[in-house]
Amino acid sequence: MKKKLTYLLLSVLILISCLVLAQMSTSNSYMNGLNLEATYEVGSDIVLKFSKVAGESPLIYLTSSYGSTVLSPEEKDNEIWYRLPSNISDKIGVVRWKCLSEGDELTGKFTLEPINTVASLETYIGPPSIEAGGTDYTMMVVIPTDSLDNPLPQNTLVNVQHQFLEVEESEEVATKHLIAFQNLYSKRESGRMLVSSSCLGEDSKEFSINVAAAIPVDFSISAHRPHHYADGNQITTFSTSIIRDKHDNVVSDGTYVNFLIANADGNTLSSSGTTLSGIATAKMIHPEKAETWRVTAMIDGIAESNSVVLDYEQVIEDFELTFSDHNRALTVGPLQSFMGQMIPDGLQVKLFIYKDDQLLEIIPKTSVEGYVIFYLEEDIYKNGDYRFQIQAAGMDKKIDNIKLW
Amino acid sequence: MVGFSRNILRTALIASYIGIIALIVSGVSALFSYLNTGADRSSMLHTEIKKADQYIPTVQWAPITNEGRPIDEENLNGIENDYLDAWYVMQVAYKTNTTAGIEDYFTDNARENIYKFIALNKEAKINIESTTLAHHPTLEFFSEDGQLAVVTDRGVVEYKSVYKDGISILKTKEVADYKIVLLLEDGFWRIRHFVKEEVEAYHPETIAINTDTINLKGINYYPQETPWDMFGDRFDKDLLLKDFMLIKEAGLNSIRIFIQYNDFGKAEVNPDKLAKLKIALDAAEETRLKVVVTLFDFYGDYSVLDWTLNERHAEKIVSTFKDHKAIIAWDIKNEPNLDFENRGEENVIAWLDNMIDLVKSVDSIHPVTIGWSNIESGTILKDKVDIISFHYYENLEDLDASIAVLKAAIPNKPIVLQEFGISNYSGFWKPFGSSEEDQANYHQKIQEIIAANGLQFMSWTLYDFTEIPKEVVGRLPWRKETQKHFGFINKHGERKASYKYISTQ
């Protein structure tokens, strides 16, 4: 109440001083301002009236927020009227005017104030996605404007409402420097925050903020496989536990998880997956020979899992080699799996061909119905003695001095 | 025989055929290569933008204590650049009543306000040439996502020249406060709200500078070999020292030199030129000569949108040398009244008025003058300059009377006859010109007038020149030849008869 009184007193003082100033500046002049006021509301029909004097009525120069212009006088009875165009009278700010008459300077100024009703709440909110945990925040900026697109005066109250899970909150912020702003902090939980604002009975539309989980913490992994044989055919699937941040929020879908598989030779295989509901999966085909895999998953630079060790048992104990057709056809097989069944198609068999201890070629082929047949073309491999080496399922077989003819 | 001539015919036919084909091929290839020139792929994307400063008012940011997100240098520069560009496009829009560029710097809603003003002013045939000379922005707010900023720009000094039907009806300087909301939209900071919070007429106070100790007995100086190009490639300190010694020994105490606006790099003053100017001033100090530095030589635009560029030029030079002991006064512009006809008297005077304010704001010690080309112009801006300077090349008989008129109008400021002289050229282009004797008589007489009226003086000039650039008096040979023979010393380095009257002794 006391504050209000002070404001009232202050504005009355300003009004009086403006009037006095206007009086002072016009006192020596031959033209007198008749209806000059210190403030007007935007959108009103503003006519500056002066008493008429002998001679030609002068032009008037006006400068407002967005620009300046010069108006011509209208003569009415014994008065000179200057009717303000809407581009001046519709925008808030201080307007200075000056009559362009010879001799005495007749000048003054007045303030255009906004209509005190809200027509739109221009709302900007960002960043649109923040981290759960109570430290990150988004900022809502509201510019309440009147029907003529003028920002409302300082200290207009704007209500900022936001809803998150069970909680609905509302806070009042006052405009300052044409805008009102409010920081909205995240809670411990992830989810979606809905935000809106209202001012003098006008409501904004709804805005939503995505509160994403914070960075994940370490997690565990498991492996699933149809059998433990190294058949080069079945697939082992690795999956993570539900990956969460330190506040127990499930990480965002699509979080990239890298699975690294170290094998017995010390080489690393890699597979990857992205999370869905916190779980990422990745797959890897079984090895073709006995192997021990040590699997670890990591979200690069952020979190990692425990290690899982997997053993794969050799399935092909031995295989036969048969030469036919002038020794030019080499049949490898039958290749049999753990129950004696033919190994599924696709097992890789490599043939190394040597002549005079010179490696001529390596021919890789994959098995079809348990067999691999290599045919050595007469045009390429001339008649003579050759040495062969066959690699399959981690085994090596050598055959010396085979004569092609 | 028949076979022989047929062979000749064949050869001729084949040769002409080859010739024509060669011509066509070379024509087509020339056309092809022409069409390929310029279409450099990198230029298609306009990735390389050469930025020339068009608008550089002084900008002084208040210490950054904004609400919201702390701002970094890059964002602040981005805001400043786009904000100033917004002012610039707005000035151009109101000058020409066209809308080019407005949409880059004002949002959809804000630009409507400018379009309305343009429509109104166009209808009423009003054009407003304006510029802002100073900005004092304060960053009030920067949003967390870096997309919105609020700036209060206080003490914006605006100069406006208002025309109706092409006639100037008002020139005004105002100082205003603005509050601006800017949004970052597709890479541009665009103005969303623009509110004038305060505005007043602006009348900077001109502080008079004491000129009691100044008594100029001087000469306008250019080196003999390089007139109007004193700070060029042939700049030589030893030569300057030699000439300055000569001037000092002749009983003079000062020289007047000229700074060419373009030569010194316009708004971006060339540091090499400044270094040469310093050497020249040092040489003057060494020989105990004082220097009147004439700015803006060979500049003649005065357009309002050029003002900020001109200000940066003068500011750089004046601030660099204001403490130099050799400086005695700043001459804003040489003979600006010669531009009245082409550029408009009011425009030129407004420009000079503003430039005096600027120079005085930078240097509060040294007096300011303007080198008017005739004595009648001497009263223009008499309340703003500290020293009245005029040039006199007319009939000496009328000089006394003219001085009396000037003194009556300006009783209390020193008056300098800043250029005077006579050419002793007499030859093919001017058969009845003056002789060396006439020149000596002229100087004897004018020194008497100067002494009788208590004027200060700076004569034109020390040397006869051999080359006169076309910018000085044009290309006409009778003018050029005349201009070559104003010196007290001829082109062979011999003192003319007039040398006796170089000073009052």
Image: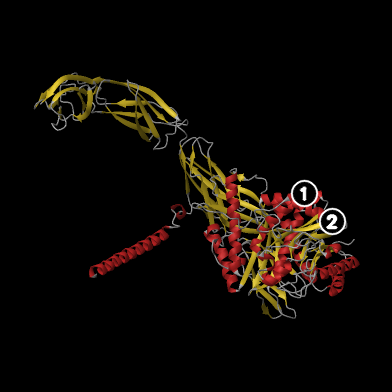
Q: Label 2: chain?
A: B
Query: Is residue B48 shown above or below B20?
Result: above
Q: Which structural element holds mark 1?
A: helix
What amino acid is found at the position of numbered circle 1 in the picture?
Asp
Q: Is residue B327 visible to us here?
A: no
Count of marks placed on residues: 2
- Residue B478, can we see it? yes
Q: Which sits in the foreground, B150 or A22?
A: B150
Q: Which residue is mark 2?
A: B253
Which quadrant is the C terminus of chain B positioned in?
Answer: bottom right
**CB within 8 Å, label 2 to label 1:** no
**Nearer the N terminus, badge 2 or badge 1?**
2
- Residue B325's place in the image compared with B333, above or below, is above
Percent position of residue B333, x then y = 73, 62
Question: What is the quadrant of residue B124 in the picture?
Answer: bottom right
Frontmost residue, B360 versus B70 = B360
Q: Tell me where residue B68 sits by quadrant.
A: top right
Q: Residue furthest left?
A: A325
Kind of residue indicated by mark 2: Asn
Q: CA distance from mark 2 to mark 1?
A: 15 Å
Q: Is residue B362 left or right of residue A280?
A: right
The mark found on residue B282 in the picture is 1
Picture quadrant of residue A404: top left
Which residue is painted at 53% across and 38% down in the image? A136
